[in-house]
Amino acid sequence: MFGIAMSKKILLNSKEIDIILHRLACQLIENHNNFENTVLIGIQPRGVYLAERLVAILKEDYNIVNVQLGQLDITFYRDDFRRRGEPLEANKTNINFIVEDKNVVFIDDVLFSGRSIRAALTAIQSFGRPTDIELLVLIDRRFSRHLPIQPNYRGRQVDVINEERVTVNWKEKDGKDAVYIINN
């Protein structure tokens, strides 16, 4: 019996990702000016790479020095965490600032079903009540939503069929920046 071969197609290369990151940083500046009342929160695990990269661009290229960045683990807030066969391994939450009455921007690499964002909305309540919450994603899988959640900022909108996965590689973790569509 023959197995089905996995195919991998590049959606974004390193240069395209860099252009998108700068565009997203500019959109954040347009809406949040000097970030005096705004905090950025990367959703663990892979949204943190995007968040850290955006903060570096804001600081180095646009001289915005007072950007507060946190990391939020949503592992045990997900509605499907008990359904997985293997034991879950939690990531680290690191939010060393107050979110009460702040504008919070959640940052994640891929918006798929919306379940991770729903979990993040629940998890952030432990840290206070934000004035406003926005969502920034690198990739928006438009037709795969299970919940009525839409991004305020999106790098690229992608239409893929359900068997296909979108995988984001970051040079900090994977050796190079790239976004792939993988068909199993």
Image (spheres, rainbow, N blue to C red):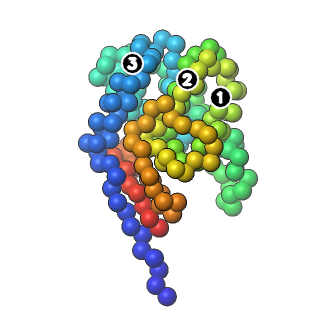
Amino acid at pointer 3? Glu
- Residues under labels 1 and 2: Cα distance? 9 Å
Q: Earlier in the sequence, mark 3 or mark 1?
A: 3
The residue sitting at 65% across, 32% down in the picture is 121
Quadrant of the rendered structure where residue 139 is? top left
Separation of marks 2 and 3 at Cα, in angstroms: 15 Å
Does the image show residue 3? yes
Residue sitting at x 58%, y 16%: 102
Q: Amino acid at mark 2?
A: Val
> Which residue is drawn at the image coordinates 63% and 43% (left, top)?
147
Give the image location of residue 106, x and y in percent. Answer: 53, 31
Residue found at x 44% / y 65%:
183
- Which one is earlier in the sequence, the residue at label 1 or at label 2? 2
Give the residue at the far bottom of this rendering: 1
Residue 36, horizontal then vertical, whole percent: 48, 11
Instruction: Examine the rendering and report whether any part of residue 175 can be seen.
Output: no
- Left/right placement of residue 151 relative to residue 75 reads left
Residue under pointer 1: 124
The percent coordinates of residue 96 (x first, y second) are 58, 22
Q: Position of residue 109 (x, y in %)?
A: 47, 42
Task: Give the mark nearer the N terminus: 2 vs 3.
Answer: 3
Q: Are marks 3 and 1 in contact (CB under 8 Å)?
A: no
- Assign a secondary structure to mark 1: helix
Whole-angstrom CA distance, mark 3 to mark 1, is: 24 Å
User: Within the image, what quadrant is residue 75 found in?
Assistant: top right
As drawn, the label of residue 104 is 2
Q: Secondary structure at mark 2?
A: strand
Amino acid found under the numbered disc labelled 1:
Ile
In the image, is 88 to the left or to the right of 152?
right
Q: Is residue 85 above or below residue 13?
A: below
| Residue matched to label 3 | 30
Of badges 2 and 3, the one in the foreground is 3
